Image: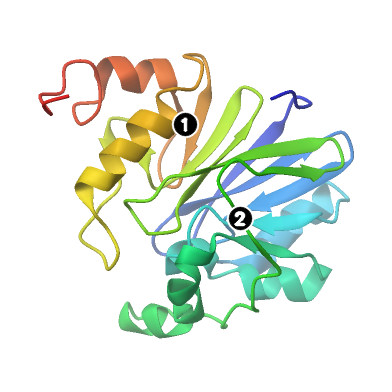
């Protein structure tokens, strides 16, 4: 899929230090996973003198959606979410309270994400790849040589599967089929921690790399 080159700004937010990403190409900006601290995210957008075209969510765990209400209220931009994560999304405030985190309930999503869909926001394009396992509606967003992978895979690790709707075998299959099939040089922007690459994880990740003793 062709796409203009992205400038990606990573903003770790909230008590879980989940990565919010600002993806910019030319004058176009998209926010991926505003998990908390909407005022801080808005301040960065104001530095860029940019209003986002959309908020796109890789999944609906509370640490990835806690800032949606603040951003959507400020900019009136549409929210994109895979429908399989809607039950999690609708209970975000309740789940936050369980962890002692108070958030504003996010507004209903405006658009559902589908596997194989291509989203276009000006000069920005995302190919949507459904990647369940960490959550039922997890997705990977691919834009040229970059991919936003949510909590599917991290540098040297994988997402947890002990939360409701999680499944280890499903997650490993998603990583194998939807992430490791991308070009080796693809940068992977994970939901927590540093960015990595397809090549690095294929070679060294003990859960999914070439040396993983997973029976496949």
Q: Give the total of numbered labels.
A: 2
User: Judging from the image, what secondary structure is the residue with disc 1 in?
Assistant: loop
The colour style of the image is: rainbow
Give the alpha-carbon distance from disc 2 to disc 1, as whole Å.
24 Å
In terms of depth relative to the viewer, which is nearer, 112 or 98? 112
Q: Going 30% across and 44% down the picture, which residue do you hit?
A: 171
User: Mark 2, residues whose alpha carbon is within 10 Å: few (<14), some, or many (≥20)?
Assistant: many
Residue beneath disc 1: 195
Q: Earlier in the sequence, mark 2 or mark 1?
A: 2
Report whether 56 appears left or right of 193. Answer: right
Q: Position of residue 183 (x, y in %)?
A: 51, 16
**Above or below, 22 relative to 202:** below
Q: Position of residue 58 (x, y in %)?
A: 52, 52
Report whether 155 appears left or right of 17. Answer: left
Report whether 96 appears left or right of 106. Answer: left
Report whether 37 appears left or right of 167. Answer: right
């Amino acid at each position: 899929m062709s796409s203009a080159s992205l400038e990606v700004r990573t903003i770790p937010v909230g008590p879980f230090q989940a990565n919010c990403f600002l993806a910019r190409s030319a004058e176009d900006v998209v926010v991926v996973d505003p998990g908390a601290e909407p005022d801080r995210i808005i301040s960065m957008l104001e530095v860029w003198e940019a209003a986002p075209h959309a908020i796109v969510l890789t999944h609906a765990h509370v640490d990835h959606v806690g800032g949606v209400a603040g951003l959507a209220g400020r900019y009136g931009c549409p929210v994109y979410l895979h429908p399989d994560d809607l039950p999690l999304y609708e209970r975000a405030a309740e789940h936050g309270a369980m962890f002692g985190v108070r958030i504003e309930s996010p507004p209903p999503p405006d658009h559902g994400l589908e596997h194989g869909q291509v989203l276009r926001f000006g000069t920005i394009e995302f190919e949507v790849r459904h990647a369940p396992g960490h959550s039922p509606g997890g997705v990977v967003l691919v834009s040229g040589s970059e991919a936003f992978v949510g909590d599917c895979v991290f540098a040297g690790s994988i997402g947890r599967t002990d939360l409701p709707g999680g499944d280890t075998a499903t997650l490993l299959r998603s990583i194998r089929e939807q992430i490791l099939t991308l070009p080796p040089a693809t940068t992977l922007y994970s939901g927590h921690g540093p960015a990595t690459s397809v090549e690095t994880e294929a070679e060294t990740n003990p859960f999914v790399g070439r040396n993983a003793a997973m029976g496949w």
